[in-house]
Amino acid sequence: MALSSTPRLARGAIVGIDPFNPLASVVLFQYNPDSLQRTLEAQTGGGEGDRSEALRLKGAPVETIKLDVELDATDALERGDPLAGSVGIYPQLSALEMLLYPKSALVIANTVLLAAGTIEILPPEAPLTLFIWGPQRIVPVRITEFAITEEAHDAALNPIRAKVSLGMRVLSYNDLPLTHPGYGIFLAHQVVKETMATIGSAANLAAAASGGVGLPI
């Protein structure tokens, strides 16, 4: 039997890590977005005119990510998938939306505490959310923008095709305490990025040397 030489396509994902309900927010992209916009804002240390601090960096840059995720139940409906036939892509949309909701059990518990006279109630903490874009890019994020365009529905008004526009802010060691799992995840991401930068610089130097390009070293 002949083996296909086509590499297996990795799919991006967004995962909300919640120990109380680990399957509630696991979203594997049905189709990888055609484009992904990333913006990095340097965190410089000095103010305007402060020459002694001009090259200081307070930490990792603030990175934002924007992308559109498409969900479509057409293929599943053609296969006769019972879940898609009964609720369309509502479960997939709900998994994304739950990244923005506090857990109902915590809301109920806090309501009971308030009714019992508790003076100070801490707001529920969101699950650790990871944006996964290949093995080299796994970063903790906070969802900052979320817009759903439902483009088609079935007879029961369940969505069967939709586009979700997401904006995310990457959480770095500037944002998280040392003991938080996201702290180490981001630090590992930066180490991978530094390794990629070294590989790229070495390749550029080799290309410059072979091409006779003079570098001002």
Image (cartoon, grey):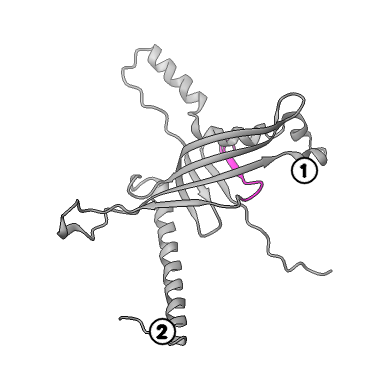
Name the secondary structure under disc 2.
loop
Residue at 50%, 29% (x, y): give it: 101
Give residue 107's position: percent from left, percent from top.
46, 22
Give 142 or 167, whichever is nearer the viewer: 167
> Is the C-beta separation of discs 1 and 2 under 8 Å?
no
Q: Is residue 93 left or right of residue 196?
A: right
Q: Which residues are magenta?
A: 22-32
Q: Could you tell me how far apart the alpha carbons at marks 1 and 2 are, in whole angstroms?
A: 53 Å
Q: Nearer the viewer, residue 185 or 29?
A: 29
> In the figure, is residue 75 to the left or right of 35?
right
Dot placed on the residue nearer the N-terminal end, 1 or 2 = 1
Q: Relative to 189, is 141 above or below?
A: above
Residue behind mark 2:
213
Q: Is residue 81 magenta?
A: no
Q: Residue at x 45, y 63 (%)?
A: 192
Residue 20 can be seen, yes or no: no
Residue 100 lies, in percent from the top left, at: 49, 33
Circle 2: residue type? Val
Q: What residue is disc 1 on?
A: 75
| Point 41% across, 62% down: residue | 191
Q: Residue flagged by tag 1: what amino acid is it?
A: Asp
Work out which quarter of the rendered image holds the C terminus and state it. Answer: bottom left
Q: How many marks?
A: 2
Residue 83 appears left or right of 32 = right
Classify 28 as above or below 125: below
Q: Main secondary structure of the magenta part?
A: loop
Res 129 seen here: yes
- The quadrant holding residue 213 is bottom left
